[in-house]
Image (cartoon, coloured by chain):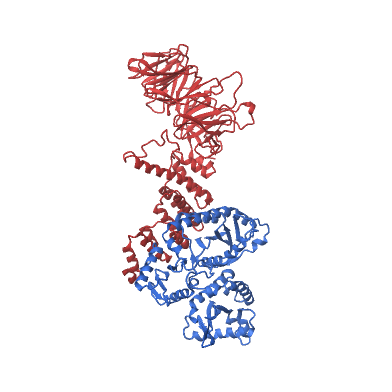
Amino acid sequence: MGSTSDVSLLNLYYFNSAYGPREGEEEKKVLYYYPSQTDVETKIKNVGLTEAIIKFTDTFNPSKPCEALHTQKTRQIIHQAEPGFWAVMTLLVPTINKTKDGQDYTEYQNDDVNDSVYLAVLKQCHLMFQLFNGNLTCLADNPTQIKNMLDQFYSRFIPTLKLQHSDLLDIFAGMQFLPLDANTFLHVQCLVNKVEASFPTVHSSAILFNDQLVWSGIDPCDMQLIFHYLVTNLLPNFLETEIEPSRPRVVGRYVTGPATSAVKDELSCSSIPRLFLSSGQNVYLVVYKSMNATSCLLLDSYSTPTPEFFRRLDAFLGSRLAQISEELAASCSKSSIQSPGSSSLGSSLSPDSPKFIYYNTLNRATKSTIHLDGRKCGLVSVSQELIKLLGDVHSDKERLKACSEVILKTKNDSWVAGKFANLREFYVVLNTKNANLIEISDEVKRMCDLHLKSIFFTD
Amino acid sequence: MASDYYLELSNNPIKFEAVSQVTNVFFDESNKQVFAVRSGGVTGVVVKGPTEELSTSFRMEDKGPVISIKFSQDQRVLAIQRSKTSVEFLNFLNGIDCLEYSQSCKGKNNTIIGFIWTSPNEIVFVTDHGIELFQVIPERRSLKPLKNLTININWFVYCNNSKLLLLSSGAYGNSIQPLLFKKGGFLKLNKFEIELPAVPKTPPKLCLLERDVTLAMVYGQACVIVLRHIPPRVDRGPGAEVLIYTMEKMLTAKKSHLLALDKTGRFAVNVVDNLIIVHHQASKTSMIFDINLPGETDGYVTFHQPVTIPLPIKPFTLRVPSVQVSSDMAEVSCELYSPNWVVFQPDIVIDAKLGCLWRVELCLGNLATVLVDKCRLVDCLVQRVAGKLVLLNVLRHLLDPLIGTNLGVVAEVFDHLNEVYRTFLEIEMQSQMATPASTSPFSRPPSGPLTTSPRAAVVIDQSDMYTSVFVPIAEKAEGAAGKFVVAVLIEYVRSLGDNRIPVQHYLYELLINTMVHRKAFFQLHQLLQYHVVSDSKPLACLLLSLENIYPAAHQLALDMLKRLGTANEEIVEVLLSKKQILDALR
């Protein structure tokens, strides 16, 4: 077996045809281009090609614009981010170098690139951009500012894209909820209420424990984005700074906002990220962490938070959040001892035990025993091949009815099952050798009973 | 201002003939009767009690000045003390029997300090050298000695509710011998000493006086309430204080509470509805103390501050016949805290010059406005007999969304309320298991002499909260206030949960409706997801009806029906209505 290459990003660009309608003005259409060192000629040519493809395909199906362009070596994903504004991402298809008859040649693994996964990634990119910068449409008459903003955002965002680890979960872009007993949940809820009542500028807030969501009062569309920003970006980075031994141990600290709670200068307060919510509101994002619990507060932006505010908030939240964190930790360890599902969850680390991914369309809750954490680090417990297969099962779902079931067997004797009912999706990966369809079907049923016993899931 | 008092005198005082040169007035604490004796009884004895049956008038021969006069508890025998060595008796079997019979004390040189009817036909003489218990046999007009005890006695205090007699002995008067009276005898309880603020070196003299010691039932326990005046030479001290010894298990007295008065001068003590009320004459104010409220403690003694600021009793006006026009009634305002006041237990104030007997009463509504600390207020109201309505008012005010009370306070208040609620439920459950159904827990007196922790007088349960507090505030809530109402409801559900009290479905319904009203669907979804709201068919139906405004409610409703396990028919019906025939068939 020769060397292999993973899927990787060739380029990513934004254009709007309206900015350069005349010949010779083509350069003006390009709003952003990665990699930036690309020469103008290539930029114009690629944008032109995409424009042409969009135009051409439009004649066949005007209701749904072209989404992907397949070539032998590349895959282009096209997404109309906002009316007139197009975002395009071109990926290099993964390859395997093989030798046949003493001759080296490269085999392109076109089937390994799932359009819906990467379309979801591209959409997510733009939503994230919107979260921090607002709609492009609002700035339509100021292309220079658009260029600056896109440049600023993507220069930081592209390095965090983990395209090789993108999979089914990117399509869902769901949130992991922490399983919790009602009373502990109520304690969290009461803390949130107290914070919001004591600090009226807090527009809404959410509480996370480790990488899992405990409570959110934020609109689910925005929460989904904020959740991913926190879990894949902000918190892991913060964790690294926290590990530094030179830092003094304090009860709680601001993840965004002033570096220490004893802030004096106004400057550190002005560096808080501002978010543009889907409702059109503009808010400050303040994230505060105490032990393993994270409080994510959205502040109304009509007044800049003062150092005084941060001091008060720190005094209020520090110990309370730490207490909740302890309570959550206790509750988690308790439930993992008690619940019968835990035994299978614990053993799920071994590669042969059954794994599942669960997604609920309505509250965007996901749960996966395939992914070992929510940070997209590629820590998965089944083979890449199977994960890609899951993406394909999902793509096939479109053609099925609302309530259905799919069972597949792979070449190396693994089984993949997908069940869809009541707006929920449940995927199971089984590594049972020499099993027949009936056994697999029974096993899937058993897992449903085990993990989804409290919900309505037709079987 | 209407709220500058929290104590008042009863509306209809018992009027009696005022003390004068010819009239002597006596008061019997046990029967709450006032005796106005005119000219030694020749021109009449008028007895006024709290009821008609306990009021009477009669004449008797004048055989010298009366020292003390008391009816037996069944009103059949009247005991009159006219000398230091004997007590005379008069039968009241069918009207007055003019034949007096007499009983003198046993010891030759003993002086009778006083006498007490301890049961309908038993009387005890307290002399300076001991006590003598007699049985009175009115039919034979004689007394039969039952039991006696020799002890040097300075003075005594008796409480008819607890049948407890305290005898002061010793040179300083602070050595106390408690006796517990039972039919036909008495029990000697453990002797104890009351701490004195300063003991004079020579010569020993009586330091603890009768007027400074009060015996009363507080929260079902007999308490010795001692006023402690700080002597002048240690002035700049904290002022006078009140020491309380509780009779534990009716056996041993233990120093348990210390009330800081922060004032000096003349004080008087009443006990009203288990609150200890200390009247201060110089400032013409009264303080109230609740020994059940938490206070600083050193492990043995709990230190208490007044429940709230000292305030005067509500001014009282007496309607008296006008001097000028006889048909008119003039209003005369009475002097409060007058030097003529005499205070009796538990709640009686007598103005002997005015000829009035009042009961001291609490105005809880005003107390609620005066007391700023809402948690203390709730703790205090929970123990008051008439506290429920006031408490509900307080809660309604506290949770008014327009006032926006701090949620931390709300949480604490709920926790306090529900702790009481839980205790109540536990007691109820125990009594249901322990005793047959015929004896309900309510037939028992609310606090027997042996209960250690006082049982709350007021229990605010979920239905009270729902109908009297939550529904009114939810109706008022609009816009941003809805958020507060949701927070309050969640806080209440949490508090119930923490106290392991199952939550009634109507609270959930209100919570869900309020959230729906606010369009806080995602939050509602999370509540259901974490099973904060318990499943039920009505709730599932409520969710189904919300489907049009929040599509996910459909899924939640189906989940809930599934969990109930008994609702397969409903599930099929729902699916059919959605034209999901295949699903329904499965």
Q: Is residue A127 above or below residue B545?
A: below
Does residue B101 appear left or right of residue B283 in this picture? left
Tell which of B359 and A229 is nearer to you.
A229
| Quadrant in the picture for the N terminus of chain B | top right
Tell which of B462 and A453 is nearer to you.
A453
Residue drawn at (60%, 81%), measured in percent from left and top?
A29
Chain A image colour? blue
How many numbered marks, from 0 up? Answer: 0
Residue drawn at (64%, 31%), measured in percent from left and top?
B236
Tell which of B33 and B233 is nearer to you.
B233
**Residue A424 location, quadrant:** bottom left
Tell which of B564 and A441 is nearer to you.
A441
User: Looking at the picture, how far across and down is residue B159, in whole percent?
Assistant: 45, 27
Q: Is residue A29 above or below residue B492?
A: below
Q: Check the image and name the residue furthest to the front.
A: A102
**Residue B304 location, quadrant:** top right
Tell me, by letter, which chain the rendering colours red: B
Does residue A233 appear left or right of residue A382 in this picture? right
Residue drawn at (60%, 18%), measured in percent from left and top?
B203
Q: Check the image and name the residue furthest to the top.
A: B108
User: Looking at the picture, how far across and down is residue B5, in whole percent?
Assistant: 53, 37
Does residue A257 appear left or right of residue A384 in this picture? right
Q: Is residue A95 above or below residue B383?
A: below
User: Looking at the picture, how far across and down is residue A440, in whole percent?
Assistant: 37, 71
User: Looking at the picture, how far across and down is residue B496, in whole percent?
Assistant: 44, 50
Is residue B484 shown to the viewer in this render? no
| Quadrant in the picture for the C terminus of chain B | bottom left
Q: Is residue B490 above or below residue B416?
A: below
Is residue B426 shown to the viewer in this render? yes
